[in-house]
Image: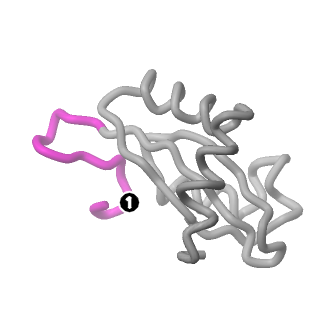
Amino acid sequence: MSGGGRSRIASEDTLVYYTYVLESTKHPGSRYIGHTSDLRRRLDQHNAGENRSTARYRPWRIKLYVAFESRALARRFERYLKSGSGHAFAKRHFWATGLD
């Protein structure tokens, strides 16, 4: 990402949206799933305690992010990852790979 603003890929007019997974560095295994158009700013907000549900598990690091061309797709993937089948998918493909 460039200089602190929103992420743009391909052209100056193309806005990228991310679904992201954060992991607490103080409480390994504690994860948070969200979506944003500015990943760096959102991580800074989580680490500054600006999100009530993540404040007590600070600091956070980005464990995974996926870029989408629309906010709707990013939001849909976030909802999927928060579902039962999405948890199973993430466990099978992201957490159980030995890449933690």
In the picture, measured across the screen, residue 6 lies left or right of residue 19, that is left
Which amino acid does the dot numbered 1 rest on? Gly
Q: Looking at the picture, does residue 66 appear above or below residue 43?
A: above
Is the image coloured rainbow, by chain, by secondary structure, or in one colour? one colour
In the picture, measured across the screen, residue 4 lies left or right of residue 50, that is left
Q: Looking at the picture, does residue 85 appear above or below residue 4?
A: above
* Residue at left offset 32%, top offset 40%: 16
In the picture, measured across the screen, residue 9 lies left or right of residue 17, that is left
Please identify the quadrant where the N terminus is shown: bottom left
The residue identified by callout 1 is 4
Q: Residue 59 occupies which quadrant of the picture?
A: bottom right
In the picture, measured across the screen, residue 96 lies left or right of residue 36, that is right
Percent across and percent down for residue 97 are 55, 69
Please identify the quadrant where the C terminus is shown: bottom right
Q: Is the magenta stretch mostly helix, strand or loop?
A: loop
* Residue at left offset 42%, top offset 48%: 66
Q: Does the magenta stretch include residue 6?
A: yes
Q: Can you name the residue that lies furthest to the left here?
A: 11
* Residue at left offset 65%, top offset 54%: 91
Between 29 and 99, the residue placed more toward the observer is 99
Q: Residue 68 occupies which quadrant of the picture?
A: top left
Q: Is residue 7 magenta?
A: yes
* Residue at left offset 81%, top offset 78%: 26
Q: Can you name the residue that lies furthest to the top here?
A: 72
Percent across and percent down for residue 81 are 62, 39
Q: How crowded is mark 1: few (under 14 residues within 10 Å), some or many (20 or more)?
A: few
Residue stretch in magenta: 1-15
Between 77 and 3, the residue placed more toward the observer is 77
Q: Is mark 1 on a helix, strand or loop?
A: loop
Percent across and percent down for residue 79 are 63, 29
Q: How many marks?
A: 1
Percent across and percent down for residue 63 are 57, 65
